[in-house]
Amino acid sequence: MPNCQLIRYVLSCCALVVVSGCGPVGPTHAVPAMGLPAAFSRGGVQWKRQTMGSQPRPQKWWRLYQDGTLNGLVERALVMNQELAGAAARLRQARELSNATRSQYFPDVNLGTLAERSKIRFRGPGGGGVIQSDNFAVPVDFRYELDVWGKVRRQVESAEALEAATGESLNALRLSVAGEVAQTYWALRAVDANRAVLSRTLEIRRKALELLTKRRDVGNISGLDLSRAETEVASAEADRIRLDQDRLILVNALAVLAGATATGSAVAEQTDLPKPPAVPLAVPSEVLRQRPDIRAAERRVAAANADIGVACAAFYPSFSINASSGLDAARLADLCDASSLVWSIGASALTPITSQKLLNARRAAAVAAHEAASAEYRQAVLESIREVENALQGGAILERRQLAQDQALAAARTTFELSAKRFKAGLVSFLDVVDAERTRLDAEKAANAVRAERLAVSVSLIKALGGEW
């Protein structure tokens, strides 16, 4: 082929490469629009693409509670939890799939070797004969499909969005695991607080039983009061044993969350329930951007949008550059000679004709998948608002409940002390003391329950805000 003809082929291929730089077909990604309450945002949450430097940084929010045991449990769970290990592996898988998709930007080049000996018999009017030949070759094949309509760019866009969504799903799971550890831990502390209350109750009831036993021995009281005292002691012991079982279950749950076996697990007993950390009541909706589940849902919408572009690009012709070169000789010794060099270069175009119905169905399916991802994104935003509202309002309500319950507890303690004094003075029956002591015990447990619930709701609020505010 003359040089000028070769130049024309190369220029034609270059023109196709230039055309491949056109913008990709398909719709441009936009976050589904939503109207949100003015209490959270003016005009709604408008998603902004975040650079790596502007992404919310993971916060060790559990340190706000200033509890060393909780810090150790959460941080160990974030390292050892097996659900997180599986999610981290899925992220690595998504990253490698994204890398594999990006490889389509580059041409496909294959190197081969060939050593062949053939023997052919032929027949003719003058007789026949045998031809035996050898063939040695080192072929190099080159193929590159031009991304004229942005099909590859859309595929890469989809893969990168799915990779980002998988990463955000991992962040969401980390937040969930840390929150579950914290809430389980506060439930354990509530059990410990109630066990301490019952221990004090048992001590009081046993002293009362000793006193009544002495009075019965000298004939000051009947056996009825003594049997009531024995019943109250046994009931308190049974309640405490039930709390021992509850504690065992919670300790084992913490062990599994931390990626350890339940056998032999232990958590130090602590009986106080601290006040939850303060969180601003006026929470702007910007915090919803911090939620990894919302960021993951937005990335899935972006991936579905890119898939529409891939489906649209399939309707257009595909252009390819094909070239081959190599060495070809009849003898192995001649393979390195300049005369053994062979080559070819060309371009091809392929337009779908009979597959229009299939392509239409694929595009319609991609559009439906995008609609589904958009609906899931909106649902995630709505759920996040509900969770923030529940936690904010629930925390405020529980704070008022605790004030009322503390007042009830103080009154119950006073009533019990007065009834005990009046009983010793012989002014009331032991039944009055029993009722007052039961009321005090119920008030103690109710106060502990409210404190534990406030701590659990504070964890829910922190999770609803994405782990920071």
Image (cartoon, helix red, strand yellow):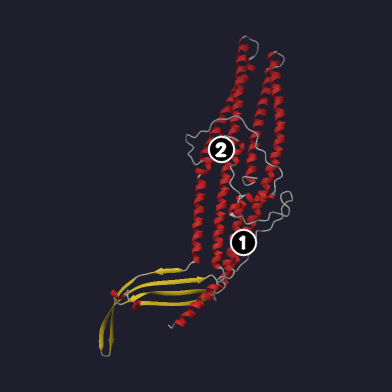
Amino acid on which disc 1 is placed: His
Would residue 299 be seen by someone viewing this image from the given angle?
Answer: yes
Going 71% across and 19% down the picture, which residue do you hit?
A: 418
Callout 2 environment at 10 Å: few (<14), some (14 to 19), or many (20+)? many
Q: Position of residue 227 (x, y in %)?
A: 62, 19
Q: Judge whether residue 365 can be spotted in this image.
A: no
Residue 309: x %, y % from top left: 59, 66
Residue 370 is tagged as: 1
What residue occupies the far front of the structure in this picture?
3
At a point 71% along the width and 49% down the height, the residue shown is: 40
Compare residues 200 and 161 and report the one nearer the observer.
161
Mark in front: 2 vs 1:
2
- Three-letter code, disc 2: Asn
Q: Nearer the viewer, residue 40 or 391?
A: 40
Question: Is 369 on the left or on the right of 33, as rendered?
Answer: left
Say if 222 sits above or below 377 in the image.
Answer: above
Distance from disc 2 to disc 1, alpha carbons, whole Å, reads 41 Å
Q: Quadrant of the N terminus?
A: bottom left
Dot 2 or dot 1, earlier in sequence: 2
Q: Residue at x 56, y 46 (%)?
A: 174
Which residue bears the numbered disc 2?
71
Closer to us: 300 or 325: 325
Circle number at residue 191: none
Please tell me which residue is depicted at 66% across the width and 46% down the height of the picture.
Answer: 387
Residue 326 in the figure: left or right of residue 281: left
Q: Position of residue 293 (x, y in %)?
A: 60, 51
**Which quadrant would residue 59 be assigned to in this image?**
top right
Question: SS at mark 1?
Answer: helix
